[in-house]
Structures are given as structure tokens and as C-alpha cells.
């Protein structure tokens, strides 16, 4: 009698947050109850019938397969050997911006690891020989040959540097520019360098900057992304930099969250602090080192880039045991997007004279992704354009004249949608707005 298991006895099972093995997420996939809390904006903040969803994939494609709940069911069936990859399954897994809206939504309901499961399914696609998609392969080839995702000449990487600004050979702060600001949106890199200079901060660049590997990681090319992460982290450590500053939200997430994930270390073990320009500027305004002088008379709205908001909680490796009712030990501090940079950009914009900051119905954790990130713009450009157009409808609804974000990917995607006639709004990066105001 004494040896009989108690009614709710369940053997403990291993539990890891390692995305290289989909088996680690069978629990999460199988426990999804299809409640769709991941698709709707949190009910507390539900802005009405017009902008009530937060999953771009489910909103665009309209079939349940494209929502996180569909992806969980497909992934579960694959992990259990009941379903093989096919063209549609591959599209469902990759036509998703990995924006994290479902993840934070689910963590208000079942606390499942949806975002990590979605990443793990892409790693599985690569392992099974069906991923990544051709456009991702082209980017991987560009990175391998030219160290940038565009295949542009590597020797032109610093051609963005504005006249009169020379980075220091040695400084506490290292500005990691990233491929997009180096080659496409040079205005963002130039504005960032001018802001640092105006604040009296000496900055250096990496002696030989390479791509951060965002698309490799996002496409499921784990080993390639890991090798790049190791190389980049080692190079920064060699410089002795205390702070690594980024003006790109996707790069910020890579360095702060996904490099530690790839290298199986904590964010705090990197050996330097990773900050985004908005954190740096916000602190400089508050300590009086930067003053917003020139007025910008406009009705302006701010778009929360996914990688700067709900995807930017720091990473800590986790291994433990799962027990009855899914409880885990040791206690796992879930990443719910609560440490996102929501206040800093808004405080900066409010400090600029003349700016009338108005909010869209969906903000912060509930913001609707611009559609560009995580390998989608290259593989599903119509989806990317559709998502930007949908967000621009929200901008129009509140009557904003200017749309500001903190990421070159968002700026590009919105600007292209505006150019295609999907909106009538000025699209700017926050670095440009700050730079214009401090130079007044
Ligand atoms: S909120 Fe979580 S449990 Fe509910 S449908 Fe979405 S993924 Fe499944
Ligand atoms: S990551 Fe974003 S696009 Fe993908 S399923 Fe989740 S909410 Fe939808």
C-alpha cells in the first residue's frame, strides 16, 4: 500500500530550452488548447473590432494552420511521426515573422514556450533537409562570401561614415552598425554617429565588422549562426569594449538574446553590455548630456519593433525537471516581453519640442509586426508588404503625419508600402528625428 503511487503521481521528466531538439517542445505543442489567446490583442487592451488581432500570419492567411495554434498542431504531428514535411507545411512554418506576439499572448494563458517552439521547428526543417528556403540560402551564401547579407562589397562597409567623424581606435563604446544601416539605410548609421559625437561619447567600430547573422538564425541555420555568433563575440571581447551599441532592433535582439541562446550562455556572461540607441539617448537626455532643441511640429506615432520590445528579454540557459501539471523545477523565470524598451523611445520623442505623440490602438506587447523581419521580406515579400499596409491603416486611423520606429527593417518596409501607395505618412527612424532635433 505504502508503495502505491499517489493519485497525481507523475515521474519527473527532463526539461530544457534547447531549440536544436524539437523533442524539448513536444509538451508545449501538445498542451496548446487552441484558445487563440495568441491571435487576439489582450482583452484588457482590446481596441475594438477593427484592429483586434496581433498575429500577422493568421490575419493575412486566415486559415488556422497559420496561427501559432496551427503551427503547434503541425509541429506536434511531425514530432510524433504522424506527418511529413510538404510544401504547405513548409510555407506555414516560414510565412511567420517570429514576431513573438503569440508567445507573449500565450504566456498570459498557458505559459507555453511558443516562440522557442517556432524557432525549433525551423531548425528541424533544416535538419530534415527541407529548409531553409531558396532566398535564405542566397543570403547565407552572401554572408559566407562577403560577410554581409546583401552580397555588397565588404570593403565598402564603412562607406557610410559622415565627413568629419572619425571613430576612435579604442573606446569603451563600440557601435555595431549592421548590414542594413551600413549599406542600405546609411542615414541611420550617420545619424547615430552624429548623436554619439554630440553627446561627447568616443566610439569605436569593430576592426572588421561582419553580419550579425539574424537571417541565418531566423531561417533555422543554427550551426552557421552559432559560428558567426562565436566569431563576433570573440572579436568584440578582444576590443575590450564595455558597451556594444546598436541602432538596429534585429541586431540588438541577436546580440542580447540570440547570441547567448546560440552559445548556451547568459546575456550577462557576454562580457559587455548590449544597448540600443534609444536606451543610450534616453539616459543622456535624463542626465543632461543631450538636449532636444529644434522643434519638430508633427502628429507622430511610434511603432514598437518586435525585436526591441517583446523579443528583447535577456536570455538565461535553463535545464530542469517537469512534474505534475507541467510545473517545473527549479523555478523558471519566463520571458514574457516585460523588459522590452517601451518607455525609452516614447520619453525621447516627448522630449522633442513640437512633437505631438499619439498612440496606435495596438502598442507595446500588442503591437502588430511590420512584416519585414526574420527572413520573411526575402521569402514572402507580398506578406511583408501586406503586414506593413495593415499597420499603415492603423496609422491613418489615428491621423498621424509621421511614423517612427527604431529599426531599419521597419523603416524600409513601411517606406516601401508608402511608396506603393498604401499610406500617406512620413516614415522616419528615431535616430533621424533625434539627430535633427539636437542639431537645431
Ligand atoms: S494562446 Fe497558447 S494555448 Fe492558446 S491557442 Fe495560442 S498557443 Fe495555443
Ligand atoms: S510569431 Fe508572429 S506571425 Fe508567427 S505565429 Fe506568432 S504571432 Fe503569428
Image: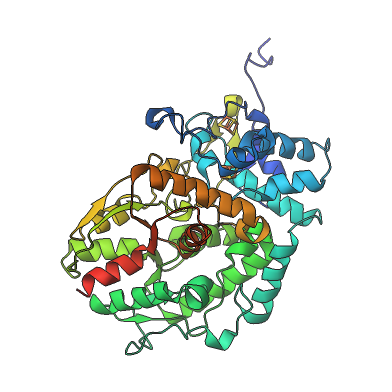
Where is 218 relative to 165, above or below? above
Image location of residue 405, percent across then percent down: 40, 58
Quarter holding the N terminus? Answer: top right
Residue that extends furthest to the front in the rendered view of this protein: 421
Q: Is residue 127 left or right of residue 40?
A: right
Quarter holding the C terminus? Answer: bottom left
Residue 405 visible to the viewer: no
Image quadrant in which you'd find residue 6: top right
Total count of labels:
0
The residue located at (47%, 61%) in the rendering is: 415
Q: Is residue 65 left or right of residue 173?
A: right
The residue located at (68%, 51%) in the rendering is: 94
Residue that extends furthest to the top in the rendered view of this protein: 1
The residue located at (58%, 25%) in the rendering is: 35
Image location of residue 47, percent across then percent down: 39, 32
Where is 24 relative to 128, above or below? above
Image quadrant in which you'd find residue 155: bottom right
Where is 136 relative to 232, above or below? above
Image quadrant in which you'd find residue 33: top right
The residue located at (84%, 42%) in the rendering is: 84
Ligand 1 position by quadrant: top right
Q: Nearer the viewer, residue 246 or 187?
A: 187
Q: Nearer the viewer, residue 210 or 97?
A: 97
Image location of residue 354, percent across then percent down: 19, 58
Image location of residue 209, percent across then percent down: 52, 79
Q: Is residue 220 left or right of residue 413?
A: right
Residue 141 visible to the viewer: yes
Amino acid at each position: 500500500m505504502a508503495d502505491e503511487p499517489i493519485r497525481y503521481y507523475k515521474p519527473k521528466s527532463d526539461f530544457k530550452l534547447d531549440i536544436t531538439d524539437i523533442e524539448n517542445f513536444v509538451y508545449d505543442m501538445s498542451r496548446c488548447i487552441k484558445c487563440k489567446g495568441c491571435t487576439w490583442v489582450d482583452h484588457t487592451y482590446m481596441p475594438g473590432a477593427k484592429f483586434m488581432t496581433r498575429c500577422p500570419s493568421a490575419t493575412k492567411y486566415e486559415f488556422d494552420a497559420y496561427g501559432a495554434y496551427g503551427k503547434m498542431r503541425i509541429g506536434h504531428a511531425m514530432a510524433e511521426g504522424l506527418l511529413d514535411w510538404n510544401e504547405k507545411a513548409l510555407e506555414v512554418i516560414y510565412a511567420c515573422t517570429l514576431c513573438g506576439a503569440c508567445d507573449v499572448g500565450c504566456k498570459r494563458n498557458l505559459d507555453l514556450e511558443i516562440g522557442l517552439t517556432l524557432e525549433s521547428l525551423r531548425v528541424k526543417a533544416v535538419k530534415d533537409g527541407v529548409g531553409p528556403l531558396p532566398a535564405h540560402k542566397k543570403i547565407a551564401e552572401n554572408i559566407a562570401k562577403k560577410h554581409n547579407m546583401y552580397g555588397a562589397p565588404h570593403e565598402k562597409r564603412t562607406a557610410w561614415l559622415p565627413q568629419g567623424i572619425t571613430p576612435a581606435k579604442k573606446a569603451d563604446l563600440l557601435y555595431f552598425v549592421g548590414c542594413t544601416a551600413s549599406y542600405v539605410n546609411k542615414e541611420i548609421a550617420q545619424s547615430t554617429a552624429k548623436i554619439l559625437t554630440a553627446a561627447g561619447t568616443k566610439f569605436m567600430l569593430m576592426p572588421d565588422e561582419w553580419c550579425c547573422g539574424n537571417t541565418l538564425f531566423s531561417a533555422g541555420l543554427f550551426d552557421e549562426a552559432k559560428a558567426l555568433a562565436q566569431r563576433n563575440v570573440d572579436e568584440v571581447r578582444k576590443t575590450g569594449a564595455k558597451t556594444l551599441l546598436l541602432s538596429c532592433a534585429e541586431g540588438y535582439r541577436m546580440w542580447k538574446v540570440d547570441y547567448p541562446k546560440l552559445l548556451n550562455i547568459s546575456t550577462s556572461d557576454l562580457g559587455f553590455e548590449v544597448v540600443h540607441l534609444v536606451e543610450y539617448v534616453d539616459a543622456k537626455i535624463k542626465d543632461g548630456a543631450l538636449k532636444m532643441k529644434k522643434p519638430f511640429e508633427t502628429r507622430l506615432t511610434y511603432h514598437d519593433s518586435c525585436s526591441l520590445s517583446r523579443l528583447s528579454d535577456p536570455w538565461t540557459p535553463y535545464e530542469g525537471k517537469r512534474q505534475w501539471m507541467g510545473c517545473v523545477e527549479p523555478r523558471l523565470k519566463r520571458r514574457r516581453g516585460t523588459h522590452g524598451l517601451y518607455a525609452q523611445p516614447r520619453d525621447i520623442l516627448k522630449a522633442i519640442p513640437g512633437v505631438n505623440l499619439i498612440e496606435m490602438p495596438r502598442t507595446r506587447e500588442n503591437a502588430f509586426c511590420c512584416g519585414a523581419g526574420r527572413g520573411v521580406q526575402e521569402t514572402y515579400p507580398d506578406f511583408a508588404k501586406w503586414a506593413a499596409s495593415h499597420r499603415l491603416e492603423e496609422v491613418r486611423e489615428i491621423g498621424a503625419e509621421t511614423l517612427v520606429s527604431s529599426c531599419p527593417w521597419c523603416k524600409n518596409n513601411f517606406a516601401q508600402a508608402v511608396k506603393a501607395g498604401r499610406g500617406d505618412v512620413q516614415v522616419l527612424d528615431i535616430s533621424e528625428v533625434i539627430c535633427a532635433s539636437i542639431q537645431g
